[in-house]
Image (tube, rainbow, N blue to C red):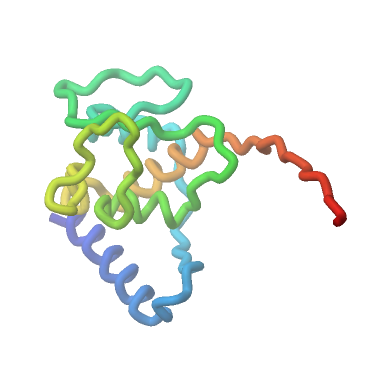
Amino acid sequence: MRQSRNVALLVLLLVGVAACQSATVSRQQIVLPEGDAAAGEQAFVALECTACHTIAGKELPDAEEVGPVTITLGGKTSRTKSYSELVTSVINPSHKLARNPFKQQIADNGESVMPVFNDIMTVTQLIDIVTFLESQYEIVERPRYRYPVYTY
């Protein structure tokens, strides 16, 4: 009960911050305490996030049941997800649905098929999972092409 209340308070805080911001401001930030990546990995497995998510380059135990999609998180990228984007993805999975080239079902009636864990996970688990996920991305610089300058 207390865990659900903590998550509910966090969600209300986020909604309040968003309501105070202009709709055109895309740099909304939340600041949570520092998390523990190892505890986040354990929570990621315990909450059976591995039913639908894999982590690039990391072997994690399989969930008891396999979900309707497989989405890989982490790995090499030219742009990593921000802390607030990761928090939002966990507490509001329908906020921004991932593009899915494999045509797996990622949404049902416009809502994500990802269960909402707000009444299940603790705020500490949320913070730790986000810290774990953040640590799984590696920023790589993409090669740039120099276009020739043509003069006419």
Residue drawn at x 41%, y 45% as measured from the top left: 130
Instruction: Give the side of residue 109 with respect to residue 26, left or right.
Output: left
The answer to whether residue 129 is above or below residue 5 is above
Q: Position of residue 44 (x, y in %)?
A: 32, 34
Q: Nearer the viewer, residue 140 or 103?
A: 103
Q: Position of residue 53 (x, y in %)?
A: 31, 31
> How many badges with numbers are in the image?
0
Which quadrant is the C terminus positioned in? Answer: bottom right
Which quadrant is the N terminus positioned in? Answer: bottom left
Q: Position of residue 40 (x, y in %)?
A: 38, 37
Evaluate whether residue 142 shows in this view. Answer: yes
The answer to whether residue 42 is above or below residue 95 is above
The answer to whether residue 32 is above or below residue 133 is below
Quarter of the view holding residue 32: bottom left
Q: Position of residue 134 (x, y in %)?
A: 49, 41
Q: Residue furthest front?
A: 152
Residue drawn at x 83%, y 50% as measured from the top left: 149
Residue drawn at x 56%, y 45% as measured from the top left: 79
Quarter of the view holding residue 19: bottom left
Q: Nearer the viewer, residue 110 or 48?
A: 110
The answer to whether residue 95 is above or below residue 43 is below
Residue drawn at x 44%, y 39% as measured from the top left: 133
Evaluate whether residue 46 shows in this view. Answer: no
